[in-house]
Image (cartoon, coloured by chain):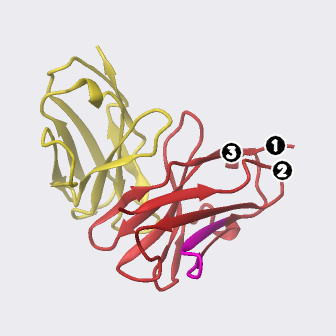
């Protein structure tokens, strides 16, 4: 059974960098036809796709965030990470990590989500 | 970007009702569409992939149809556990985009 778990600071100061990690069990992040994704959801609002990384390490980002986002793999720990720079209050949201299966479906497995608040 | 427009944004229905939610894409996405159910405080759950394929473990009262730019999610007989918010997502082109959501409420 594939399981994903987000971790990281729940509070980030404005202009600082948001860093989250998604730990994966039940699957190897460096093999298979999978993407490893980040999605966020502000309170009471809809879902926003942030970006994803393929098992090979190639990445795609939402252009609305592209200049501030980096997603990377840590194969030694079987986890992947999100880094979002220069955050503002508009980045306050629940952040989810998820697995997408190539040529089948996005989001077949999700983490439970972690709330990140941007505030001083 | 492919814009995904869901309708209605809110739907009031009773247990046993047949419910249909529509998702329209601004450009053709072939059948690269997924449907999710989300309950308060929980992560979305995949229901349908490739527009009409039922994810394993999802009750057969859920079904999806459509291709190109128009898609529907149908719940054949609404159950108490189905009151939730539903989202569509296209994965035909980057950036992947979601519809705005449809909240299914108790009538």
Q: CA distance from mark 2 to mark 3?
A: 11 Å
- Could you tell me which secondary element the residue under label 1 belongs to? loop
- B83 relative to B96 in the view: left or right: left
| Secondary structure character of the magenta stretch overall | strand
State the image coordinates of residue A50 (x, y, percent, origin top left): 55, 61
Magenta-drawn stretch contains A77: yes
Label pair 1/3, CB-CB below 8 angstroms: yes
The picture quadrant where one finds residue A71 is bottom right
- B10 relative to B94 in the view: left or right: left
State the image coordinates of residue B17 (x, y, percent, origin top left): 15, 22
- A44 relative to B62 in the view: left or right: right
**Would you name the residue on which mark 3 appears?**
A92
- Chain for mark 3? A
Give a yes or no on whether discs 1 and 2 share a subunit: yes
User: What is the quadrant of the C terminus of chain B in the image?
Assistant: top left
Magenta-drawn stretch contains B2: no
- Chain for mark 2? A
**Would you name the residue on which mark 1 appears?**
A119
**Would you name the residue on which mark 2 appears?**
A13
- Give the answer, above or below, for where B5 lies relative to B51: above
Query: Total of numbered circles in the picture?
Result: 3
Which region of the structure is painted magenta?
Answer: A73-82
Q: CA distance from mark 1 to mark 2?
A: 5 Å
Q: Colour of chain A?
A: red
Q: In the picture, which chain is yellow? A: B
- Chain for mark 1? A
Q: Residue furthest right?
A: A120
Q: Bin the neighbour count of mark 1 within 10 Å (Cα to Cα): few under 14, some 14-19, many 20 and up.
A: few
Q: Residue at x 20, y 19 (%)?
A: B15
């Amino acid at each position: 059974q594939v399981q994903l778990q987000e971790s990281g600071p729940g509070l980030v100061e404005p202009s600082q960098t948001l860093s989250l990690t998604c730990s994966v069990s039940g699957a190897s992040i460096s093999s298979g036809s999978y993407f490893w994704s980040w999605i966020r959801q502000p309170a009471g609002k809809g879902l926003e796709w942030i970006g994803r990384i393929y098992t090979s390490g190639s990445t795609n980002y939402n252009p609305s965030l592209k200049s501030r986002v980096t997603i990377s793999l840590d194969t030694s720990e079987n986890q992947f990470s999100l880094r979002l720079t220069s955050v503002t209050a508009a980045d306050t949201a629940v952040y989810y990590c998820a697995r997408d299966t190539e040529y089948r479906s996005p989001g077949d497995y999700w983490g439970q989500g972690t709330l990140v608040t941007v505030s001083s | 970007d492919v814009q995904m427009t869901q309708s209605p944004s809110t739907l009031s229905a009773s247990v046993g009702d047949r419910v249909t939610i529509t998702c329209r894409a601004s450009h053709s996405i072939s059948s690269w569409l997924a449907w999710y159910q989300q309950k308060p405080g929980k992560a979305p759950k995949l229901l349908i992939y490739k527009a009409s394929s039922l994810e394993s473990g999802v009750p057969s009262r859920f079904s999806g149809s459509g291709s190109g730019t128009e898609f529907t999610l149908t719940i054949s007989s609404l159950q108490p556990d189905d009151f939730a918010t539903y989202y569509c997502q296209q994965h035909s082109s980057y950036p992947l985009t979601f519809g705005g959501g449809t909240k299914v409420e108790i009538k």
